[in-house]
Amino acid sequence: MLWSANLTGDGMQRKGLGVNDELTLFVGTYTDLGAEGIYTCRMNAATGAVECVDVQPGIENPTFLGVDPSGEHLYAASERMSGDGVVTAYAIGQNGTLTLLNSEHTGGAGPCHVQVDQTDSYVVVANYFGGSVSLLPIRADGSLGARTDFIQHHGSSIDPQRQQQAHAHCVMIDRANALVYACDLGMDEIVVYRIDHATGRLIEQPDLTVRAEPGDGPRHFAFHPSAAHAYAVNELSSTVSAYDYDAQSGALTFGQRISSLPTTWSGDNTCADIHASPDGRFVYASNRGHNSIAAFAVESGTGRLTPVGHTSTRGEIPRNFLITPDGRFLLAANQNSGNIVTFRIDEASGGLEFSGHETAVPAPVCLKLAPGRE
């Protein structure tokens, strides 16, 4: 049975968001599954209601999006299964409309994750099918320059279908804007690179590489707000790994590995995404198959996780999800059922309750809020 907490209040003014505030939300999709492109939506900060107001067509499978810290530019990865991958740059208008700037090749097939560095200088890309990581410079007008670095991963693991070769799946930059943590599902590793901002190079830090359990398939990665912990969601084993994180050295020290599923579940499942709440008291992970969000309480000091419960995403195959900056809402993108569902987060328990708001979007994969418009 899927579990959801009962909420006693909505914490309207938590973290300072007012009842009239409106957020700009961008949705990445699979055009191969019937979507038209990148959708621009409005989210009511008081109720969690989402309304799509525009769509940017003319881009193939913009499955993952990155927005720069200024909120002025958006970068979309086109997840092509073969050939040279592409990232496309857009300018974001005041009303959230997108204006095409340019596109650049990533050098690898199937780009599936992008992140913009904190100085709006570079976009880092994970190429899933190509098993590689790319670095592309950002020009003054927000457009992309030709990639300055490309690193091919080499390796495999024990799953003969999913881990026969390298499959880079996520690239996360630390708060110091110095290190990139690249989850490679195929190699069962989290590979760490230092960004050389002067030369536009990624320099591997082999002493910081983390090796997951064979067959885990680390997919996505999240830092804890305290900068003392970090978490990886493992797609193939449906687990979450907790690490102690040394922000000075960048070292990750394994601390815990815990299932994302209820003990009673016996069906097929793969994990997709992971995020910590803004106050750092909870961690959430999405389950595809069980079609739920797993919630974990974070033990103060140690960062270890205790299961809180599982909430149905009210759809099929939840991919990316986001937590609003005030910590009041969680939005889940259900790829196969074509809906985005808003849940209220209980401030005390971390449990989720359906807000009553659900929005139809074809094949949604990635959800991103525009900074500076929250």
Image: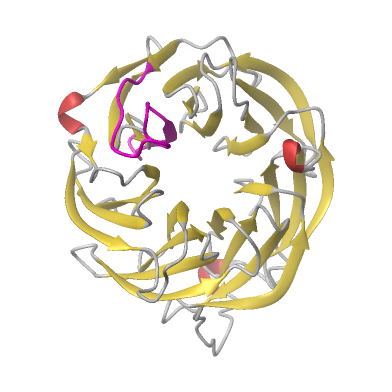
Q: Is residue 109 left or right of residue 151?
A: right
Q: Is residue 137 left or right of residue 276?
A: right
Q: Nearer the viewer, residue 96 or 53?
A: 53
- Residue 50 in view here: no
Q: Nearer the viewer, residue 354 or 346?
A: 354
The residue range painted magenta reads: 152-176
Where is residue 172? Give x, y as percent: 40, 37
Q: Is residue 188 left or right of residue 2?
A: left
Residue at image point 36% right, 49% down: 234
Give the vertical position of 219 relative to 276 (above or below). Answer: above
Asked whether residue 161 is drawn in magenta, I would say yes
Q: Is residue 134 left or right of residue 18?
A: left
| Quarter-of-image position of residue 71 | top right
Residue at image point 21% right, 32% down: 209
Q: Nearer the viewer, residue 234 or 343?
A: 234
- Residue 168 in view here: yes
Where is residue 316? Give x, y as percent: 63, 61
| Quarter-of-image position of residue 271 | bottom left
- The residue furthest front is 160
Give the vertical position of 29 relative to 79 (above or below). Answer: below
Asked whether residue 9 is drawn in magenta, I would say no
Task: Give the quarter of the figure containing the C terminus.
Answer: bottom right
Residue at image point 29% right, 17% down: 203
Where is residue 151? Give x, y as percent: 38, 16
